Image (spheres, helix red, strand yellow):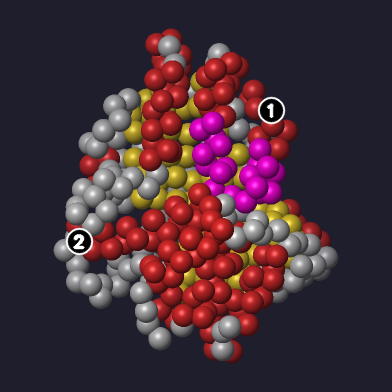
Amino acid sequence: MQKNVIPYLFVGISLLFFAPRIMAQDLSEKATAFLETLDPGLQQKATFPFDHSERFNWHFIPRERKGVNFHDLNNRQTQAGIELLKASLSQQGHQKTQAIIELENVLRIIENRPPNDTYRDPENYYFSVFGSPHASAEWGWRFEGHHISLNFSSKRGTVVSATPTFFGSNPSIVQVDLHRGRQVLQQETNRGFAFLESLTDSQKAVAIYTDKAPFDILTANDRKASLQQPEGLSYRQLTPSQQNMLEELIGIYLGNYTDQVRDRLWEKFRAAGIENTHFAWAGSTVNAIGEPHYYRIQNPALLIEYDNVQNNANHVHTVVRDLNNDFGNDLLGNHYLHGHPHVAD
């Protein structure tokens, strides 16, 4: 049953470029189609109640996970899972997902691991479905493994939450022959520095709140993201051209989602007051390996974090959090309101 998943992910991406745009209501159909390819044992392994505690047990490190991974799946099941993934992301988001998975093979080389190593393993990514994926039902699903955590919640054919969303890249810039020079999260890095460089010295004095970058994103894998009052420079303190640059940087992160989800998140940004958005920087202002740096974009509704500190500052972590609706909190509230007991395990 084992196979190399990478060629199948490449096929999935190439199909995505030429496929018609998938409507949001098709997501439940894709999830149902995926589950129908699984035998009863794999279905049981892959599915959980909508409010099961496992749904909030998210992380971005290599570790044991629940659900089914590519090792469990044959070619037909793998392709059905990829179709679900394609329906849940934009082309950009799907490309990043595939490229991050492929970096596991790069890490095997860097760390001198054998080809069958299971710690750095491009097939060790998991599909988990929460609830029954019907167009009229409340349900969710997750795709997760090292440096990827994608969490979706849906109701009546609409994705109401697609956060937390975590993308990481180790290495940030590949320095071995396999994919030498590849920089999966290049836009997040370079546009962040470009925005910083657009600031005047007096603006930088406000935006750079410390010269030491944190070791990791500050919200880590918390169930609920929470930071104190925002640090750094307010949107109001920017020139119109700088405001455009900051919105373009935000757009890079929101561009990983489908158009529907992207537009809804933009609405949240603006409803909370785009003028209430802050940009904060920590650490080095030099865009180079060995120069640890961090930035975040914080709004009353949404939070974006970027960190590049580990492995001699050649290891990027990024996350998008909906400060009010991670994991579809609105759906969960409705779920409990109508008398559904919480499922712990």
Secondary structure under the numbered disc 1 in the rendered image: loop
Q: Quadrant of the C terminus?
A: bottom right
- Of 191 and 313, which appears nearest the observer? 191
101 horizontally vs 300: left or right: left
Can residue 60 be found in the magenta stretch? no
Q: Along the polypeptide, which appears first: circle 2 or circle 1?
A: 2
Residue flagged by tag 2: what amino acid is it? Ile
Q: What percent of the width, then of the height, locates residue 309? A: 31, 40
Q: Is residue 160 above or below residue 300?
A: below
Q: What percent of the width, then of the height, locates residue 62? A: 36, 63
Residue 51 visible? The answer is no
Q: Is residue 287 above or below residue 51?
A: above
- Of 222 and 177, which appears nearest the observer? 177
Farthest-out residue, bottom: 40
Q: What percent of the width, then of the height, locates residue 125? A: 43, 68
Residue 9 visible? The answer is yes
Q: Residue at x 56, y 84 (%)?
A: 38
Q: What percent of the width, then of the height, locates residue 211? A: 33, 25
What residue does disc 2 label? 109
Q: Residue at x 48, y 34 (%)?
A: 296
Farthest-out residue, left: 112
For disc 2, the neighbor class at 10 Å (few under 14, some 14 to 19, many from 20) is some
What residue does disc 1 label? 273
Secondary structure under the numbered disc 2 in the rendered image: helix
Q: Quadrant of residue 34?
A: bottom right
Farthest-out residue, front: 18
Magenta stretch: dominant secondary structure = helix
Q: Residue at x 26, y 45 (%)?
A: 181
Which residues fall within the magenta stretch? 248-266
Q: Residue at x 23, y 57 (%)?
A: 178
